[in-house]
Amino acid sequence: MQTMRATCRISCICGNAAQEVALGPSLNHSSLNLCHCTTCRSITGVLCSSYYLLQSPPTHQEGLVAYQHSGCTTRYFCRACGAHVFAYVKPTEQYFVAAGLLERPPETKSIRHWGTDDTGDGGLAAVCHAEVAYPTNSCWLDASLDPSKQAGESRPKRSAQDRRELPVRCFCTGIDLRITPPDASSTEASSPWPDLLVPYHSGSSANATDAKWWLRDGNTRYLAGCCACRTCRLASGFPIQSWAFVPISNIRNADGSPHPLGTGTMQRYESSPGIYREFCHRCGATVFWHCDERPRVLDVSVGLLQAGSGAMAEEWVAWATGRVSFEEMALDRTLMQHLTAGLQEWGPGQIVRERQPGA
């Protein structure tokens, strides 16, 4: 029975976190643990976090921000690009590394879901096939601790105003925004087709008819989908980033003021010329992706949405189920197979492809 120590190279998108890490025994990382608890979603911006246990502490933490969100757990994220890198659980003195940063991740043989009680609707666990599920509200990072002392965050209570607007909040609440329902202004933006609907490897992204692809169901909901591209993986720290596509005219600050970019604890990282990512510089949650080519439609991290129905926010967004954006870039092929198969079973025909490449 193999329990060899494995050394892996990790890096975030800007390279600040680049180093070698020693993973724990191979028996501990053949299963990919996906945690869907409220804490993980609101502190990362993704719908589920995933970490591997380390054999020993990281060799360096320079350039990382430490955010202690409980008496037991501290998360470390890159000061420059916002990628989550490490987690430290004090009672057990264990370090963990964010799964999306490994250049050569271990082969995933099984998937386990944790913290699904916190989601309200099952979250991504209701979509992604798994061998085992632990329907608790405690975080996977705290699984080895006394569960009576490690209750997860309960789902936030909704006000009447919250039912008319969709709160977008990170764990530390330094990011506190609102999404409004689609309206006349939602159709004023223009954008090329996203890879989510028209794979870039199969045709042009040009949107010759100016289709408002980010609006669904008679302009009553926004489009949402999962992305597995390299830059999202290295900028978040996790294999899967989920985005909702929302016009900037439908995003406002909590006080009702417009122009949400750069407010609160938001920090910008330009991952490529003309391509921008925002994250919370206090807790590290991913917030936005946007670019100069389509400045009026923003990608919003779904993990920050606080919808009444649950983590998937289905009263606000319609999920693309025919494809994971840039799925061919995924390093964890087992995870990708589970997710794509689950999406297609979960919502057959929910979002149909609206045109063929070149049409």
Image (cartoon, rainbow, N blue to C red):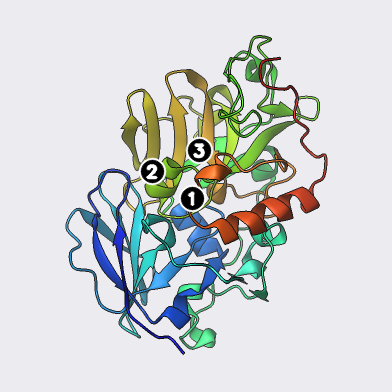
Measured from the top left, where is residue 61 in percent x and y? Answer: 20, 62
Circle number at residue 45: 1
Identify the secondary structure beneath mark 3.
loop
Q: Is residue 100 above or below residue 241?
A: below
**120 and 334: which is toward the camera:** 334
Residue 279 badge: 2
| Residue bearing the label numbered 3 | 254
The image shows residue 302, relative to residue 61, as above or below, that is above
Q: Is residue 344 above or below residue 246?
A: below
User: Which label's residue is closer to the chain start, 1 or 2?
Assistant: 1
Q: Residue shown at 27%/68% (left/top)?
A: 21
**Secondary structure at numbered mark 2:** strand
Residue at horizontal 67 percent and vertical 34 percent from the top: 223
Horizontal placement of 204 versus 120: left or right?
left
Work out how far the residue at label 1 is from the one at label 2, CA to CA, in angstroms: 9 Å
| Amino acid tagged 3 | Ala
